[in-house]
Image (spheres, rainbow, N blue to C red):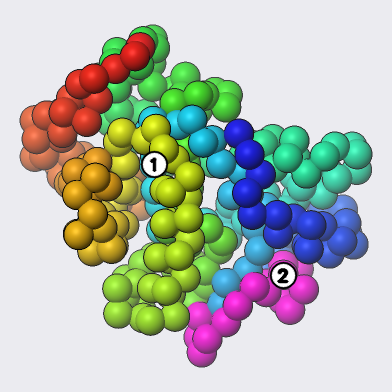
Amino acid sequence: MKGSFKLLDIFKSHIKELENKEKYRKVDLLNEKFLIASRGEVAIYYSSHNEIINEGAEILIVGICPGWRQMEMAIRVTRELLNMKLDDDEISKRIKLKTRLFGTTRKNLIYMLNRLELHKVLGLKSSDELFDGYHRDLHTTSLIRYPVFINGNNYNGNSPSLLKNQFLFNIASKSIKSEINALSKVRLILPLGKAVERFLCRIYKDDENIYTKIIKGFPHPSGLNGHRIKFFNQNFYDLKSQFADRLKVSDH
C-alpha cells in the first residue's frame, strides 16, 4: 500500500478550516478552495479517498469518478482524522476503507460477484470480505480519480461523452494509466458500466496484455440502474467464463 498522489498535502489546510458539520452542503465544498481544474461547464474538485493504491492487488474495480455523496463523506471523515495527528498515508487508508463503494452499490456488486463465485476463487466465504478491510487482492478506483461536476451535478460519463470531450479524455487517460502501471500483479479489471468499459477498451485496444484483462458486459451495480439484473442475467454465463479465464492461474 502506498500513498501515490499526495494532493492531501495541498488541500489539508482547507479541510482543517471547514466548520464542523454533520453534513456539508455543495456551497461548502464546490468552491475555489477545492477546485483542481475546470473547462467550461466541467469542474473537477478535490476528494481525499483515492490517494492510496494497493500495489499488490490482483483485482481492479473501476468506476467513472466519485460523486458528491462520496466527496462529502470523504472530506468530513478527513477533517476528523486530521485532528487525530495521523500521518497522511494512514489517513488516506482509513478514508479509502470508509468511503469506497458503499451503500446499495456495494450490496448489488457483492451480490453479482458472489453469483460469479469470485469469492471461491479467492478462498473467501463471500465477496463482501474483499471490502471489509484493506484486502490484499483488491484495488478500487475511478477513471478520473477526483469528483467531476457538470454545472454542479454529478458526471455520469455520457454528457459530455468521456470519449469525445478532450479535456476529460486526457485527464482520465493519464489518471487510470498511472494506476494500472503501478498494479503489476493485476489479473482482472472490472469496469462498472458501459461507459467505463468503452473507455478502457479504447485506450488499451493496442495493448493486448491489459485489454485481455478487461471484463466485458458487466452492468453498473448502482441502484439507479434499473436494468442491471436483466443485463447481468443475460450476460451471466459469458461473465462467469471471463472471470474464470482471468483467474484460472491462482496462488490462492
SS for callout 1: strand
Looking at the image, residue 25 lies above or below residue 42: above
Circle 1: residue type: Ile
Residue 9 horizontal side relative to residue 231, left or right: right
Q: In this view of the protein, which residue sits in the foreground, 162 or 231?
A: 162
Q: Quadrant of the C terminus?
A: top left
Decide: few, some or many residues near mark 2? Use Cα within 10 Å; few <14, some 14-19, many ≥20: some
Where is mark 1, residue-wise?
Answer: 61
Q: How many numbered tags mark residues here? A: 2
Disc 2 + disc 1, Cβ < 8 Å: no
Looking at the image, residue 187 lies above or below residue 226: above
Residue 96 found in image quarter: top right
Looking at the image, residue 174 lies above or below residue 233: below
Marks 2/1: CA–CA distance? 26 Å
The first of marks 2 and 1 along the sequence is 2
Circle 2: residue type: Phe
Where is mark 2, residue-wise?
Answer: 34
**Residue 1 shows in the view:** yes
Location of residue 9 in the rendering, given as x and y in whole percent from the top left corner: 79, 57
**Residue 73 shows in the view:** no
Q: Which residues lie in the magenta part?
A: 28-42
Q: In this view of the protein, which residue sits in the foreground, 218 or 55?
A: 55
Location of residue 229 in the rendering, given as x and y in whole percent from the top left corner: 21, 39
Query: In percent of the image, x 51 and y 89: which residue is there?
Result: 40
Task: Decide whether residue 96 is among the magenta residues.
Answer: no
Query: In percent of the image, x 38 and y 73: which residue is there?
Result: 169
